Image (cartoon, helix red, strand yellow):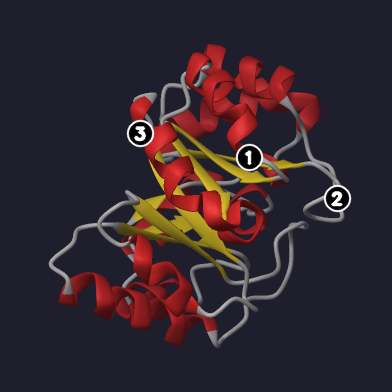
Amino acid sequence: MLVSPSILAADFLNLGKDIAMLNEGADWIHLDVMDGSFVPNISFGFSVIEAVSKVALKPMDVHLMVVNPHKWFERLAGLGAANVSFHLEAAGERTATNIDEIQALGMKAGVVINPDVAVEKLFPYIGKADFFLIMSVFAGFGGQKFIPESLGRIAALRSEILRRGNSALIEVDGGVSSDNAPALREAGTDVLVAGSSVFKSANPLKAMEALRRA
């Protein structure tokens, strides 16, 4: 599996040091952008993303938890983002257009849903999106407890992707740890987003390797 640690759990007073550590041990670097409107929290904006882009050696994996996500695609492309995901709940009927716009800018496009959105709502975008992000907690805050029912949702999405002969990746975000990583892999997960379980561990590099080997 790929590991995409979320810098939401990093030490922002020593962010350069943490990014250097991710350059050594991560596959992607996950950036959670929250606007205080779509979710009840604010994380960071483009000044932080720009700073990360200057030192990141691994692909930047940007998760937009914002209203009107399409307003920011060009700017993210200019900063070198590799992956951009946005919420189906925020995009609505514009979801397919958002996918096209992200891909036209040379980035991989992902569609995200919260735990209270039926996973079947992602099915129309199989064959269009490059990856899907299943939230296993509700978007907006780090450190939440993993929702076990997420495993069935992941398995249903994986089954439909395989049925259609597609190769879209499934990314999972929320309460991910080495304890549930084996079950997530068995359900069909390709990419693990982990925050606290990496940055709060005694040895973040070993924590990332444990997730990858799960």
From the viewer's perspective, tell me whether residue 161 is left or right of residue 87: left
Task: Tell me the tag on residue 69.
Answer: 1
Q: Residues within 10 Å of mark 2 (few under 14, many from 20)?
A: some
Please identify the quarter of the rendering in which residue 175 is found: bottom right
Q: Residues within 10 Å of mark 3 (few under 14, many from 20)?
A: some
Q: Nearer the viewer, residue 90 or 132?
A: 90
Q: Is residue 194 visible?
A: no
What SS does tag 1 mark? helix
| Residue 32 picture location, percent across and down | 65, 43
From the viewer's perspective, tell me whether residue 53 is left or right of residue 167: right
Disc count in the image? 3
What SS does tag 2 mark? loop
What residue sits 63% from the left and 40% below the top? Answer: 69
The quadrant of the rendering that contains the C terminus is: bottom left
Please identify the quarter of the rendering in which residue 15 is found: top right
Q: Nearer the viewer, residue 91 or 109?
A: 91
Residue type (three-letter) at the residue carrying disc 3: Gln
| Residue 55 picture location, percent across and down | 53, 15
Residue type (three-letter) at the residue carrying disc 2: Asn
- For marks 3 and 2, the one nearer the N-term is 2
Task: Tell me the tag on residue 36.
Answer: none
What residue sits 48% from the left and 42% below the top? Answer: 98
Distance, label 3 to label 2, CA atoms, is 28 Å
| Residue 101 picture location, percent across and down | 43, 33
- For marks 3 and 1, the one nearer the N-term is 1
What residue sits 30% from the left and 74% below the top? Answer: 158
Residue identifier under label 2: 41
Q: Examine the rendered structure and indicate whether residue 153 appears above or below residue 82.
A: below
Q: Examine the rendered structure and indicate whether residue 27 appears above or below residue 147.
A: above
Task: Tell me the tag on residue 103.
Answer: 3
What residue sits 50% from the left and 34% below the top? Answer: 22
Q: Residues within 10 Å of mark 1 (few under 14, many from 20)?
A: some
